[in-house]
Each structure stands twice: as structure tokens, then as C-alpha cells.
Amino acid sequence: MKKIFIQNDIMKYHNHFIFFLIFIFSLIACSTNNNLIFETNMDNSTNNFAREDRRFFEESGGYSIILPELWEAAEASGYDNKVLFGPEVNNYTPVIGFTFEAFSGELNEFVNRILNDLNMLFGEKFKLLKRDAFVTLLEEHGEKIVINVFIGERHFRQTIYFFSKNENSKILIVCTVPAETDSVYDAIFDRTIKTFEWTKNYLATDKKRFIEEAGGFSIIPPEPWREAKFQNINYKVLILESEYTSFISPDICAFSGELDEFVDSFIEQSKVDFRDFLLIKREYFCTLKQLEGIKTISTVLNYNEQYIRFIIYFFPVEKEKKILLISCAIPAEANDVYDVLIDKMMETLVMLTN
């Protein structure tokens, strides 16, 4: 595992956040010297935007986030949470760090306190550029500030995101680059932090199990997916209302043959029924209860002239000679943002009739 060792006397700072801030500055300042020990290989892709299969889980902090391509997580000596490092550019490395502060007030009050601390510490060397509300893909509401600050002779730009873990604890996600980069990293930081979520929400507990008696199955949806019932649809559906509003809906088809045969015929019929049908992936899928099925990913052009990404799971209902289809419809521009999340949800599938 990659480790980072930093030699700095920063324990004199009494405020935990200020301690952390100086720690982050020390990382970006020495990120190209011999104090860094890298043991993991970098991804060769040049795409800087996030992919769900690069989701990073931080057990000690109880959260997860998707790493952009070419970024990697590193352990830091004496520090609980891993730090994220981007690719080196012009002798600097962008850094994203995570820290918690005990605070029992409202989030906006906490942000006010942090801004006051920064102003008191750095004075004229500190400038607030922007302060906005910020919402993640899974509707975690927080705040975001963008600041410029001088540390010695170095000038940094920081984008800091704030979220409440609970009534008494706040998390700060601190993204740091040299100030001369200006807004170059803003979109990457926003896109990355939009994928932030608390681990407890990544997969809800059994108390949140979604039971579809008419369809003969149950699954555990992540927060904040909610169930709904529509006219002319036989079964309840799950809806995620976010930047990429998505739907999960089941269906039951009578079929007495092999599952592979059914999927073959389903794909061929889809080529007839949908415009611009494109099969991206077909693979076997297994739930936590060892129910074996098949998963396909495809894109189609719908009647509203919008491209939709379909993730469809096929499972046999052996005693009734039927096939259960669970279709996940996502705007195609979301790409694979929800793929791993939906896989984790489908792994919790339990058949009520088997």
C-alpha cells in the first residue's frame, strides 16, 4: 500500500481544522520530493471525470467517493483518513483531504466559524472568492467555499466542501491547488465531490428493504431512492430524483426455456422495438443469496429524442417458469455513475417465491 511521510512541526496549532489545513499545504508543497513513497500504479486513461468503478471507501471516516482517473488515495503518517492525489502538473500535485470537526450547531454557522478562523489566522493573506450551497448526486446538502491564501511565499487556491455527518460532527473536504491554476480544477472538484456519500447510505439496512409482493421479490435500495406506484404499471417502481433522475422497474414474463435463450430473444426484440439500440455489455450476475442471473447494459433513443442507459437484470423464477426482469433507466449522459451502486442494490435481491 502506498504511504506518505511528512516531516512538519504543526502540532502547535490548537484548532483541528487549522492543523489539517497546514498539513494539506505541506502535502502539496512537498508532493514532488523524496518524502513521498508511491507503491501503486497510475491509470493510463486520460479521462479526468469520475467512474463508479473507481469508488473509494474510507472505513475510518464512514464515507465513500469516486476518484477521478489518474487520481489515487494515499495513507498519511499520523493521519486517520487517506488523502487523494491527482497527477503531477508543472511540479505540483493537486490534493483532496478530509477532516472532521466537532460542532453541534447548524452547518452554515460552522462555515461562518471556519471563515472567521481563517480570517483571524491569515488576515490580508486570505481572500474569500465564493460561497455557495452544494448538493451531491444523492441529495446530500452542504456548502462550498473557494478561497485564496498565502502561506509564506506560496499562493494557494482551495475549494472546501462542508457536510454534516450528524448533529455533532461536520466533515470538511479540502481541495488544494496553486492559485495560478485559477478555476482550471473547479469542474473536476465539483464532479468528484458530487459523488461523495456516507457509507451508511451506500446500502440501506434491512429496515429499508423494498418488498414487491406482486412481483415476488425484495431488494434493499440505497438512500434516497423512494418507491412509487404508477397507473398502467403492475408493480411498484423505485425513483431517484437527482441531477440524473432514474427509475428502477420490475416485470415478469412467462418463459419455460433457459435464461440465456430468453435474454437472446429479448435483445433481438429490443433491436426491433427501440431506435439506436446498442448493447454495451452482457454478463452473468449473482446475488448475495447465490441467485444466478444475467445482466445487460444498453443504450436506446426514446420517443422524446433522449438517449437512455438501461441496466437490466434477468433472474429465473424457477417454480413458476417465469423470468423476473428488473430494468434500471438512467439518462445516458450519466454514463456509468450509478453502475456499481445499482449492482450493490441488486446483490440484495431475494425471491419471495423461490
Image (tube, grey):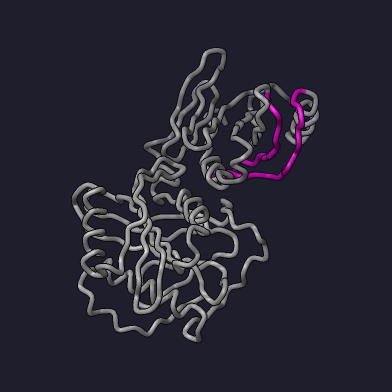
Relative to residue 223, is residue 23 depicted above or below? Answer: below
Residue 201, position as x, y percentages in the image: 40, 45
Residue range in magenta is 273-302
Q: Residue at left 76%, top 32%?
A: 277
Query: At 28% across and 55% down in the image, what residue appears?
Result: 170
In the rendered image, residue 158, in percent from the top left (x then y), is placed at: 40, 62
Q: Find residue 13 and report its image quarter.
A: bottom left
Task: Indicate whether residue 28 is drawn in magenta.
Answer: no
Residue 100, horizontal then vertical, whole percent:
30, 61
| Residue 67 appears in the figure | yes
Residue drawn where x is 36% and y is 52% of the image: 130
The spot of residue 188 in percent (x, y) is: 52, 55
* 117 left or right of 331 in image: left
Is 280 in the magenta?
yes
Taking 174 as reference, is 40 above or below it? below
* Quadrant placement of the C terminus: top right
Residue at point 34% right, 83% down? 8
Instruction: Identify the main secondary structure in magenta.
Output: strand
Q: Residue furthest front?
A: 124
Question: Would you say residue 318 is visible in this rendering?
Answer: no
